[in-house]
Image: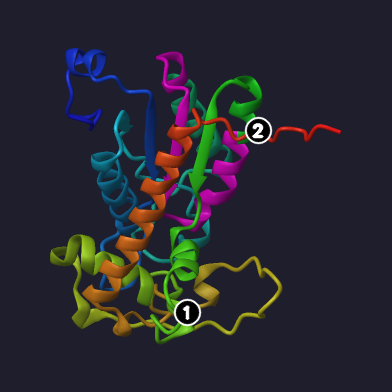
Amino acid sequence: MFEAMKMTGHDYKSGGFDKAILAVGSLESHGGHLPLGTDTLISYRLARKVAQRVKGLLLLPPLTVGYSEHYSYFPLTLTLRAETMVDVLKDVLRSAIKHGILRIFILNGHDGNIAPIDMATRAVKTEYPQVRIASLDAWWVSAGRLLPRGTFEVWDGLGHGGEGETSMALALFEELVQMEHAQGVVPNLPANVDVKWDFAELTDCGASGDPTKATVEKGRLIEKVLLEMLVSFFEDMDGRNWDYRSVRSAR
């Protein structure tokens, strides 16, 4: 038993948990073909698979609403204010720390959560220097780096409800995907400058990229490389007692 939502007090006390993983998602439109909770479903199901393979890793309940103001044109988007998101993350982290969880990993599924996660974790780390906090802020970027070139057909698989995300959905919860409604737009964005867009400026269908190119096979490849990377991370960190500090060379 490793899922906090399902365990009893006895299960927790006898479980020997020395670290926890927290999935962070959102509830917002991902086009006509994906569930509104896609970001939460992907991050939580991936986190669950990691917890199954890593000894002593407690799976915390997911945060199912994030900062999604920039997607709010499309129904049904629920959003926290950015400052509220930061406070919620701080409170969850502090609560875990209070009960002896001093190694925490955040697995994020939504772009709007990246800045709040950074702000919250840096603040909590300052409060509790002994705590170790790590995160995977953008699995879709990491997957693109880990997979062989040519895996994706359009826009490097990127997009909100695009080729990569839809492929992951097909691999993890195909029964909730309606591919007959899949459509997307590849936005005309500059290559080296970060434009602070509202999503309605990029697409008229609630999705970007090209979800029609998504397949279960691509999703399984993404899942495989991410799981291998994450499990290896925990094995490496556990092997050195989460000590990542540099040691000054002797003169």
Q: As rendered, which of 77 and 124 lies closer to the eye?
A: 124
Q: Which residue is mark 1?
A: 156
Q: SS of the residue at dot 1?
A: helix
Q: Is the residue marked by circle 1 packed among few (<14), some (14-19), or many (20+) residues within 10 Å?
A: some
3D distance between C-alphas at marks 1 and 2 = 35 Å
Specify whether 184 is left or right of 116.
left
Q: As rendered, which of 3 and 69 lies closer to the eye?
A: 3
Looking at the image, is mark 1 or mark 2 earlier in the sequence?
1
Q: Is residue 62 above or below residue 242?
A: below
Q: Magenta segment range?
A: 96-121
Specify whether 72 is left or right of 75.
right
| On-image quarter of the N terminus | top left
Residue at the image position 29 percent from the left and 75 percent from the top: 218
Q: Is residue 226 magenta?
A: no
The amino acid type found where label 1 is placed reads Asp
Q: Is residue 114 magenta?
A: yes
Q: As rendered, which of 241 and 222 lies closer to the eye?
A: 241
Q: Residue 44's spot in the image, x, y percent?
A: 30, 47
Residue at the image position 36 percent from the left and 77 percent from the top: 163
The amino acid type found where label 2 is placed reads Arg
| Label tally | 2
Q: Which residue is mark 2?
A: 245
Residue at the image position 31 percent from the left and 55 percent from the top: 42
Tell me which colouring the rendered structure shows. rainbow
Q: Is residue 98 above or below residue 34?
A: above
